[in-house]
Image: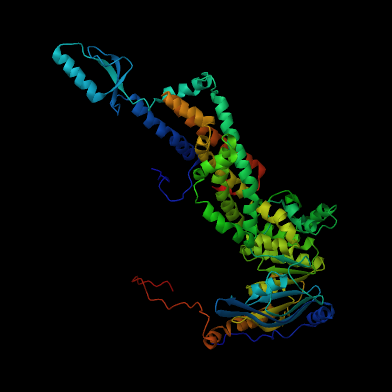
Amino acid sequence: MKRTKWFQVRKPLSPASRTLFGILSFVVPLTIWSLVSYVPWIWHPQVLISNPGSVGYLKPGMRANRAVFEQEVETAIANGAAPPEGRPANPVYLPAPHEVATAFYTSFTAAPETRDGVWLHESLWHSIQIIFWGFLISSLIGVPLGILSGAYPAAARMTEPFTEFFRYLPAPAFGALAVAILGIYDGPKIAIIVIGTLFQQILIIANTTRQLDVALVEAALTLGTKRRQMLPRVVIPGVLPNLYRDQRILLGWAWTYLIVAELIGTSTGITWFITQQARYQHFANVYAAIMMIGIIGLGADMALAKLGTRLFPWDRTEATS
Amino acid sequence: MDSRVQRPSYLDQAQAVRERFDRLKARDVILTVRNLGKVFKARNRETVALRDISFTTHRREFLCVVGPSGCGKSTLIRILAGLDEQTSGDVLLEGKPVAGPGRDRGMVFQGYTLFPWLTVKKNVMFGLEVNNDGATDAEAQARQWLDLVGLEKFADAYPYQLSGGMKQRVAIVRALANQPRILLMDEPFGALDAQTRARMQAHLLEIWRKIDITIVFITHDLDEAIFLADRILVLKPHPGEVQELIEVPVPRPRRLDQCTTDDFMATRERLEELIHRGQPDRDDAEGAPEVDHYPALTRLTDVTDNVE
């Protein structure tokens, strides 16, 4: 029998095992969800009433706690009255996979519930724009500052101690302030994303820049590279693939601030959609919307990873992992 | 146990060799190092890395620097390159003091320092481009240099696609493309396997013969030093000082089979004597720098058939 490599520390997997485990990472949680949803004796703490029988307060389509339901059944039988009927059900906040899958489609086709409401695709597009502007503004400041800090110790000492302090301040804490300064529309939302991303960004980019092999800088010096040429000719090209990877991670970070940001001022975007649907107890739609964020985030990251291998053909980090 | 064969001294030079050295010394002085000293200060401790180093090299000379670890040979070459600053003394290149790194001194490092984001050709063009001269024919020049080391086929490859020996060949021509007055090499073949290393040594001599370049080459491999050098500067450690500047009596052109000749063996014996002498008693005298000493081992096995 071939000895398995699965439990050897840092031993690379075969391509087949890689694919297998990759698929399993999604299949396992989905299976657990399906089991809980479709196997009647697993969890299902409630009963969905189909026929109230003789019990007055029960209505068809109502969910009752199982204990209450069973007691009503016993009482009815003991009194010789018609017992209520129903089937085991989960609480309304845990829809089954097929319901969420349907909601993926129907939530796009369903017209807004209120007159001033927006369609789902409009909500999503609004969220994507908030992320885009927040991340762009953060990067325009954070990337140059990070590179400078990584390259020049003087710049690092000038920025990093304060940045270290500021990054511990929770971005949502600036919500009220941002509204006071920037109004109730998109301004404060973008600001929250910038505050949440920028300070981490400066430190991460600076750290990555510091990873550049000093020997490359020295080699460039012995070839006659002047000081002003060092950043554009050696430092930036040298760290670019890693910097790009950092930006991908930071973009994911920006997404995590989205929901908080969109709650500030007037609720907008996908957050508005989620809170609306939750209010109407359309939990399948809520799950679908949350998953859409995940799919957009993962999809964007995978697209950027693909683009990265095109942009940096010399980069070996990805190839060896 | 004096098993040594009686050999001619390493100081005896054949007629042709002596004439070569006379011609060499008649050439211009390229590099002058005068009373060079380097002290590292770490908190309240001072370590003297180099003390009173003086020597000169002539145009088209091949100088090797050898010495045990800790003798400051890397520090020396870094000062020559302008990457470190000396504490005292002068480094003069063609009579002018050296200040900071510059294109007049090319350097090849032990580690691979090709720019990974540039193709082989672009790496060779790097020096020409940053110095902004003849950007029009930089590419043509790069191709010529790659031709010289037989890597023209790899002009558009990235460094990661090359073997270690190929990388160092590119690193050498990258430095040479700038047409420096002197080429500094810091154990450039140290990371290569034995075969590649031998081929690179022969190849380097080939390059050196064909162009007007003075080479200062650091190594800890004595055979490598004798095989390559006109003269060998022997340093001793703690602090780094010049022990002797040996004129290698082995005639040129050099061939690998010369390593069994009397000249070669005599030079090698002398080098070993210089390098192994002075180390232990030096430590006692100095008392300080913790030397790595290997303990006598106790026997840890009870099998009876001894391996030796």
| Most foreground residue, A113 or B78 | A113
**In the rendered view of the protein, which quadrant contains the N terminus of chain A?**
top left
Q: Quadrant of residue A76?
A: top left
| Most foreground residue, A238 or A284 | A284
| Most foreground residue, B110 or A127 | A127
Q: Residue at x 56, y 48 (%)?
A: A320
Measuring from the top left, give residue B39's x and y in whole percent. Answer: 63, 79
Measuring from the top left, give residue A71's x and y in whole percent. Answer: 19, 21
Measuring from the top left, give residue A8's x and y in whole percent. Answer: 42, 49
Q: Residue furthest left?
A: A78
* Observer able to see residue B122: yes
Measuring from the top left, give residue A177's x and y in whole percent. Answer: 54, 43
Q: Residue furthest front?
A: A180
Q: Please, is residue A117 above or below residue A315 in the view?
A: above
Q: Residue at x 17, y 17 (%)?
A: A75
As drawn, is B206 to the left or to the right of A56? right
As drawn, is A303 to the left or to the right of B181? left
Q: Please, is residue B76 above or below residue B7 in the view?
A: above
Q: Residue at x 54, y 31 (%)?
A: A268
Q: Please, is residue B215 above or below residue B272 in the view?
A: above
* Observer able to see residue B116: no
| Most foreground residue, A196 or B256 | A196
